[in-house]
Image (spheres, grey):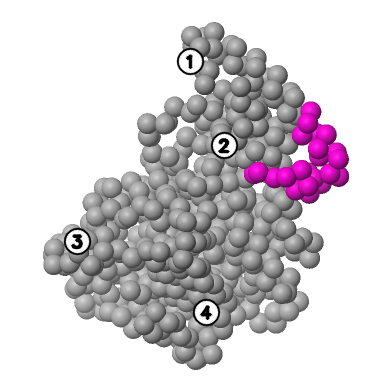
Amino acid sequence: MSTDDAFAEAYRAHYWAVSRFVARRLDAPAHEVEEVVAEVFSIAWRRRTELPDTPLPWLYGVARNCLANTVRGLGRYRRLLHRLGNHEAAHGRQTVDSPDTERPGSWVHEALARLSAADQEVLRLTTWEELTVEELAVALGCGRSAAAMRLHRARRRLRAEIDRTRTTVSVRAGGDAHE
Amino acid sequence: MSDELELLRAANPVPAGEGPWRDRPLDATAERGLNRLLHGTRTRRARRRLVLRAEAAVLALVGVLAFTLSDAGSSPAVAAPAALVPHAGTAPVSLAELARRAQATARTAGPGDGPRRGSHLQSWYLSMQTGPDAASPVTVPEERITRWNADGSGSELVVATDPRHPGRPVIHDDNGRWTTVGDGEVLHRKTYPPGSGDGHRGLAARTKPPTDPAALRALLASLYGSGDTEHTASTTPQLLLALSSFRQEWTPGPRETAAIVRMLADTGGLRPAGAVTDRLGRRGQAYVHDGPDGGMNATRQMVILDPRTGQLLGTEITFTKDLPDFRITAGEVLSYEAWMP
């Protein structure tokens, strides 16, 4: 298979996964998400000779850098929103209201948002992108053991934030936050 | 108490199985993006400039323009199609009248005339081949056929059409076996075994197209709009773009067609422009939007409908202004799509 064919196959297989990766991290309307995804694949295209056999974690790595540039290019307000990780503003946009509009996960997002950007990214890649530690290492551009360590530490800090949030929320809401 | 990773996993704001970014075959915008990469090159700086300008722009239009503008240094495509011109002296049919005709056709439709998942189209998008391997920039229309069956099996075939026979369909469905004619180069061919459709059954595929115009419009806005329905999904160019993406997923039956024509009539943004012969030699009625396009206001959108049934035959976007810096002359075609049953 030629490099171009391999790229086309990776594009077709992972276009939506990369779109989700961007949509999860960019508080922007759909057309801006598409613009960033186009940019991701444009950069991936220029680097297509580096495309590994399992391209998705590598594409996530390209997307991370691309997103960082994009976020830097957005206005101060946007950057602030992004740093706050406000998924409500970003993701309430496409969906028709439904009985589950009330997002049960929002307090988890709050806990996540209080972590450092690096911790957040490790945790998002592991849970939302469902990467293994090996894949995490590729996406983060570090070694496997470094990735495992970063995940371990981030998990511990998330655990602490969740416990703190749940205590606060349950006191505020009369314990409704407990499962 | 749940594991913290499980909690976070459950709080995934953009799951893979639903919403606008769910897993499914590429939509028209994504296909365009791939096509641009495979058949052209871009400069990042030009693209970035456009991204900044594109804040409120129509998404695919801007995507295409971004490519166009970024290749400003290259020669224009030699195989660019000529814009369709409405026949002189033909009486235009109003969209309201055509909506009535489509409704009448829908009333005679049987239970088997429902919508079918999948589509068959010929398309062309302004594209230029550059780089060391491309001596002469050439753009060839491509034809795409996608089918999904009730058992979850499906197939996709993309063929570059034979440039010696412009306007001729190159894929023939021979009782479920597709054959290509001429020397149409197969760009992509994939067959999905029964059951594999689940992986491609996103919201658009699961949602049977409504036969109510308002419901259809709401669906298009939720599936393909930017979510800011007040400002973007409600514009005619945005709606036509959404319709194009939708049409790639579904081949509508007479009832859905009636809803499409009524929806277009209700937008009020399209004026009848008379009869045209489309690129597959079919007689159609053209309806044109030449108002703001949400981007550089340099384009005209045309939709072509069958004058008897209202069936969506195709779309065309042409430039309405010279863009001398980019060697674009008013009247040149930016893209066309011709849909087949």
Q: Is residue B8 above or below residue B86?
A: above
Q: CA distance from mark 3 to mark 1?
A: 52 Å
Residue type for callout 2: Asn
Asked if the residues shown at circle 3 and circle 1 are in contact, with their CB atoms under 8 angstroms apart, the answer is no
Which-is-in-front pick, marks 4 and 3?
4
Q: Are marks 2 and 4 on the same chain?
A: yes
Asked if the residues shown at circle 2 and circle 4 are in contact, with their CB atoms under 8 angstroms apart, the answer is no
Q: How many marks?
A: 4
Q: Are marks 1 and 2 on the same chain?
A: no
Magenta span includes B288: no
Residue type for callout 4: Val
Pick whichever, B208 or A8, lies toward us. Answer: B208
Q: Is residue B116 visible to us here?
A: yes
Q: Secondary structure at mark 2?
A: loop
Q: CA distance from mark 2 to mark 4?
A: 38 Å
Magenta span includes A136: yes
Q: Quarter-wise, where is residue B93 in the image?
A: bottom left
Question: Which residue matches tag 3?
Answer: B99
Asked if the residues shown at circle 1 and circle 2 are in contact, with their CB atoms under 8 angstroms apart, the answer is no
User: Which chain letter matches label 4?
Assistant: B
Q: Are marks 1 and 4 on the same chain?
A: no
Residue type for callout 3: Ala
Q: Are marks 3 and 2 on the same chain?
A: yes
Question: Which residue matches tag 2?
Answer: B12
Asked if the residues shown at circle 4 and circle 3 are in contact, with their CB atoms under 8 angstroms apart, the answer is no
Question: Which residue matches tag 1?
Answer: A176
Q: Dot 2: few (<14), some (14–19), or many (≥20) neighbours within 10 Å?
A: some
Q: Dot 1: few (<14), some (14–19), or many (≥20) neighbours within 10 Å?
A: few
Q: Dot 3: few (<14), some (14–19), or many (≥20) neighbours within 10 Å?
A: many
